[in-house]
Image (tube, rainbow, N blue to C red):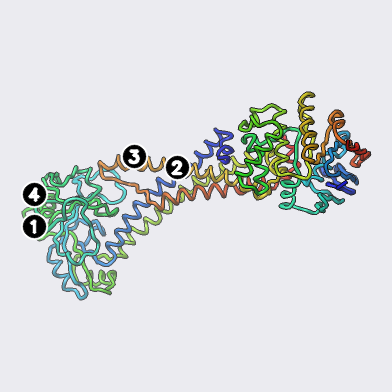
């Protein structure tokens, strides 16, 4: 299987104050294959979000290596990081995190515009993605006019708009009720199967993890159990 | 427009900030309009006085004298080496009893003897009717700023100093002294001037012999300031003033006046700029999470900076346009209120309008730089965690 992400011996220390550190990662290693839908579980402070942020080029490691689609990216900085985030990775967050003044279609198009696509083409692509997540009738609504589940669908559409190699979800169902949560997981599962998009999802929810191909367990800044990929049916 | 939506996310705050700029630009426009008006007035004077010498009776105030002389001075001056022509004139205030503070040039009467024809290069054009000609007794040509004040209309009579005159022409606006002048032939002006004298004196003077100033035209290449000294030396009891004299008495004080005016306007703009910095800094703080999202979905630092600077520039632009509009209304209102007494104090020139607008935008951009840089340099992970 083709590897999308490979991280090796990542360390990351956050300084909270003078002589007060948190070692979020202490030599974590992980591989994610193309087309996989993997969940990362672990207690709070186990480093799962930090791992995801570094793998997704939102943050940089203190030490260790990161390969994204076969390319070494742990040394990338500034503009290059922004470019990778824009085109090779899509993010979905817990708090939905849409821009409140922009409509659904504008929120999705924004990611395409940051990737250098013209406004008109970005809007067309955005509409296509919103249809894909089942929000074709809510395109002009601003986030405050959408339910939590609908907002998260917009966020998924936004994560997909630049055809990234991988979509990363940081507790994407954390703010949703059980029913809506299952719907969102279904949407991601459908996209994963239908388009072959790789998903890496940080979650506390065992049901969400159970819907994924494998579950990675982290504790104290290292990967405790990389899990076993469920064989493709 | 997305930028506008962001600016007006907090409507009250946006309006207050924009008004801060508006007030600054308003001050700049109104005070600048006053400075521009005075500047043009003085520029006209500098042009008029540039190549000639003005001779007046000793003791008068340079340029605005009322110290009469005998017409024989004209002949005396023309005998001076380097002088090509001398022309007598009578200048006096239009109002018998001038009251109130008057910025700029007071309304005046000018009696002319037509000896300057062919020598004078400072042209005044006619907007309506015709120019004054020799022998036009009982007729006047009226400067454009005085039309309302004395209710002048070509073909109709107006009252000047208690006498009826027929208006035969109205001058085009020159933006300098002639706008505030009623022109008449020398004889009519002499009648008025002598009529002002006490009865006892009136009979002792030969009124056809009186002039209050002599305009001296020089040979090409003659330095008018040096010639003024020569004339003062050769002819007793006169003051002669060249262009330097005019500059010293008018242009220099105006420069200082202008500097004060612009300094006041700039101070109020600086205050407006600080309020933009304040607003943008607050806006960045409130939108920390949004900045994190934007960065997470691929916005470069440059894109974030451009966004916030654009918002700040729009605040400046809106404030500038509003200030310019309000300033225009105030200036128009003040000018039309002043038209009755012929005190048009303000003039919005294109360079003032464009300059004030541009300045507001530049101020917006400059004020946005620090908050925008702060926004762009946020760490995306920390920004996303920000509540």
Secondary structure category for the residue under label 2 = helix
Mark 3 lies on residue:
B333
The answer to whether residue A206 is left or right of residue B39 is: right
The answer to whether residue A137 is left or right of residue B212 is: right
Residue lying at the far left of the rendered structure: B203
Mark 4 lies on residue:
B199
Q: Determine if residue A129 is in view.
A: yes
Q: Earlier in the sequence, mark 4 or mark 1?
A: 1
> Quick check: marks 4 and 1 in contact, CB under 8 Å?
no
**Front tag of 4 and 1:** 1
Asked if marks 2 and 4 fall on the same chain, the answer is: yes
Q: Earlier in the sequence, mark 2 or mark 4?
A: 4
The answer to whether residue B53 is left or right of residue B29 is: left
Asked if marks 4 and 1 fall on the same chain, the answer is: yes
Q: Earlier in the sequence, mark 2 or mark 1?
A: 1
The span from disc 2 to disc 1 (Cα, nearest Å) is: 51 Å
Q: Determine if residue A217 is in view.
A: no
The image shows residue A44, relative to residue A17, as above or below, that is above
Name the residue: 49% across, 42% down.
Answer: B319
Mark 1 lies on residue:
B135
Mark 3, chain letter? B
The answer to whether residue B380 is left or right of residue B259 is: right
Mark 2, chain letter? B
User: Which of the numbered marks, if any, corresponds to residue B323?
Assistant: 2
The span from disc 3 to disc 1 (Cα, nearest Å) is: 40 Å
The span from disc 3 to disc 4 (Cα, nearest Å) is: 44 Å
């Amino acid at each position: 299987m083709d590897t999308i992400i490979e991280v090796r011996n990542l360390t990351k220390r956050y300084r909270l104050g003078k002589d007060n550190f948190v070692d979020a990662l202490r030599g974590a290693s992980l591989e994610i294959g193309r087309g996989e839908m993997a969940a990362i579980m672990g207690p709070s402070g186990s480093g799962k979000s930090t791992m995801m942020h570094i793998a997704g080029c939102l943050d940089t490691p203190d030490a260790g290596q990161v390969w994204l689609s076969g390319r070494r990216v742990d040394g990338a900085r500034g503009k290059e990081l922004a470019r990778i985030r824009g085109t090779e990775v899509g993010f979905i967050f817990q708090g939905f995190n849409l821009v409140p003044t922009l409509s659904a279609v504008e929120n999705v198009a924004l990611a395409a515009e940051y990737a250098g696509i013209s406004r008109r083409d970005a809007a067309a692509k955005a509409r296509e993605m919103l249809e894909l997540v089942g929000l074709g009738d809510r395109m002009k609504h601003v986030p405050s006019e959408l339910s939590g589940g609908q907002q998260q669908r917009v966020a998924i559409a936004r994560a997909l708009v630049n055809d990234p190699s991988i979509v990363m979800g940081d507790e994407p169902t954390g703010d949703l009720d059980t029913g809506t949560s299952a719907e969102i997981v279904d949407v991601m599962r459908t996209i994963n199967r239908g388009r072959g998009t790789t998903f890496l999802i940080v979650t506390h929810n065992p049901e969400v993890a159970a819907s994924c191909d494998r579950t990675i367990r982290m504790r104290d800044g290292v990967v405790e159990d990389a899990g076993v990929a469920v064989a493709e049916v | 427009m997305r930028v506008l939506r962001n600016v007006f996310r907090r409507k009250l705050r946006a309006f207050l900030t924009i008004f801060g700029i508006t007030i600054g630009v308003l001050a700049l426009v109104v005070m600048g309009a006053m400075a521009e008006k005075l500047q043009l007035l003085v520029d006209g004077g500098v042009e008029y006085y540039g190549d000639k010498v003005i001779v007046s009776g000793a003791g008068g105030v340079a340029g605005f004298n009322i110290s009469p002389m005998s017409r024989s001075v004209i002949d005396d001056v023309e005998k001076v080496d380097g002088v090509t022509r001398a022309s007598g004139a009578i200048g006096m205030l239009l109002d018998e009893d001038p009251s109130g503070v008057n910025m700029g040039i007071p309304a005046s009467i000018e009696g002319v003897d037509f000896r300057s024809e062919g020598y004078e290069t400072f042209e005044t054009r006619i907007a309506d009717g015709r120019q004054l000609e020799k022998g036009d007794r009982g007729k006047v040509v009226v400067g454009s700023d005085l039309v309302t004040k004395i209710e002048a209309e070509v073909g109709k009579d107006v009252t000047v100093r208690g006498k009826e005159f027929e208006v035969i022409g109205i001058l085009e606006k020159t933006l300098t002294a002639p706008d505030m002048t009623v022109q008449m032939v020398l004889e009519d002006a002499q009648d008025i001037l002598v009529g002002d004298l006490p009865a006892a004196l009136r009979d002792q003077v030969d009124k056809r012999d009186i002039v209050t100033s002599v305009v001296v035209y020089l040979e090409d290449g003659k330095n008018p300031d040096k010639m003024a000294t020569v004339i003062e030396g050769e002819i007793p009891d006169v003051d002669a003033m060249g262009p330097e004299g005019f500059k010293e008495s008018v242009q220099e004080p105006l420069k200082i006046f202008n500097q004060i005016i612009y300094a006041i306007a700039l101070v109020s703009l600086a205050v407006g700029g600080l309020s933009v910095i304040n607003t943008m800094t607050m806006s960045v703080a409130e939108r920390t999470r949004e900045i994190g999202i934007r960065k997470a979905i691929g916005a470069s630092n440059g894109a974030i900076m451009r966004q916030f600077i654009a918002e700040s520039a729009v605040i400046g632009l809106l404030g500038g346009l509003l200030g310019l509009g309000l300033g225009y209304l105030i200036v128009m209102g003040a000018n039309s209120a002043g038209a009755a007494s012929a005190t048009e104090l303000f003039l919005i020139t294109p360079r003032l309008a464009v300059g004030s607008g541009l300045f507001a935008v530049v101020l917006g951009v400059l004020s946005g730089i620090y908050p925008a840089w702060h926004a762009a340099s946020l760490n995306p992970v920390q920004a996303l965690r920000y509540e």
